[in-house]
Image (spheres, helix red, strand yellow):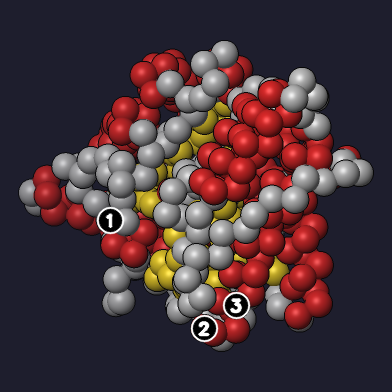
Amino acid sequence: MTQIQSTKEQIEIKLCRSGILLAIETSCDETAVAIVRDGQEVLANVVSSQIDVHRRFGGVVPEIASRKHVETITVMIEQALEQAGLTLRDLNAIAVTQGPGLVGALLVGIMAAKSLALALNIPLIGTHHIAGHIYANQLVAKLEYPCMALVVSGGHTELVLLEREGQFRVIGRTRDDAVGEAYDKVARAVGFPYPGGPHIDRLALEAEEVVSLPRAWLEPDSYDFSFSGVKSAVLNVVNQAKMKGEPPMPAAIARGFQESVIDVLITKAMRAIKEYGAKQLLLCGGVAANRGLRAALTERCALEQVPLVIPPFEYCTDNAAMIGAAGYLKWKHEQFVGFDFTAEPTFSLEQWSVMSS
């Protein structure tokens, strides 16, 4: 028996068992490892955040992020296995974020995944970061197709139609700043440190006054987003207050900004659901942890009788459980990658879609 035949038979034996995937996520500034069974049961989920390291720079520094991943990845893998009560030999496959993200950060996770898969002789699954955010919802609810995903994060703002499992069609995306990026810039303008989203969310919910700010609707039939205008409007309000020697009223600005953003996000999402006949709305991404957005979307969906799925907070921000959930889509169809695959910083979500068997 040749070595190639032996390897193939060992992999086939692994495929006959339930899918226990070790998932790795290192696309930005969180080093995350999870162990997920059959795409739904989270056996372990550990995350090491670098927020404190990057805060003094006002944002993520790619080189520092990569170095921190190198320092942390092995420890996180060990912690995940210990939390799950498993050994490396219990794993059936390795799923890892292939993109999009910071190329140096992605490569750290990919090299760790390749080393494990090679040493254990098990399949390797390259996984899309946004597919992970979308399928984080599968960890808490059964998805019904067709469904619509509203992706809101630091680098992405998209409306994604899922006509069937693992098939993605982007019908709208941001033309400039992503919503999370806009939150951070507005927070900086009113004097809050990185990451700014939680500060703006808190202030907006506490504010009794509001500064009226514009909404960017774009073309009447467009599902695209634009947040650079409302960000610029905030800067104008702050600068005008400074010129008059007045305090900038950060709470009122935060409320006005958040109301503008939420209004556009929800209005376009609800219109898309009606046009495409979606059975569910999925909220996905780091900004899905925003309490104002969660509350407003819950209220609107209840009013219009649209089933809404929102992951718990720990599955909104970057984590590896979501990569395990999305990676399982490829596992089921045996769509693995070779050891020559590499990071894809601008990876297309539609391109990653599961191929029909």
The answer to whether marks 2 and 1 mark residues whose Cβ atoms lie closer than 8 Å is no
**Which residue is at a point 91% across and 44% down the rendered structure image?**
208
Closer to the camera in the image, 318 or 189 = 189
- Picture disc at residue 276: 2
Q: Residues within 10 Å of mark 2 (few under 14, many from 20)?
A: few
Q: CA distance from mark 1 to mark 3?
A: 36 Å
Vertical relation: 132 (above or below) 357: above
Q: Residue furthest left?
A: 2
Closer to the N terminus: mark 2 or mark 3? 3
Q: Amino acid at mark 1?
A: Phe
Q: Give the tally of numbered discs.
A: 3
Mark 3 — residue? 271
Q: Amino acid at mark 2?
A: Tyr
Q: CA distance from mark 2 to mark 1?
A: 31 Å
**Which residue is at a point 47% across and 71% down the rendered structure image?**
219
* Residue 83 placement (x, y as % from top left): 62, 34
**Which residue is at a point 39% across and 24% down the rendered structure image?**
62
Q: With 228 as the anchor, is 105 left or right in this view?
A: left
Element at badge 1? loop
Q: Residues within 10 Å of mark 1 (few under 14, many from 20)?
A: some
Which quadrant would residue 204 be assigned to in this image? top right
Closer to the camera in the image, 270 or 208 = 208
- Picture disc at residue 336: 1
Discs 2/1, front: 2
Vertical relation: 243 (above or below) 91: above
Which quadrant would residue 274 be assigned to in this image? bottom right
Element at badge 2? helix
Element at badge 3? helix
Discs 1/3, front: 3
Q: With 17 as the anchor, is 240 left or right in this view?
A: right
Q: Amino acid at mark 3?
A: Arg
* Residue 177 placement (x, y as % from top left): 48, 45
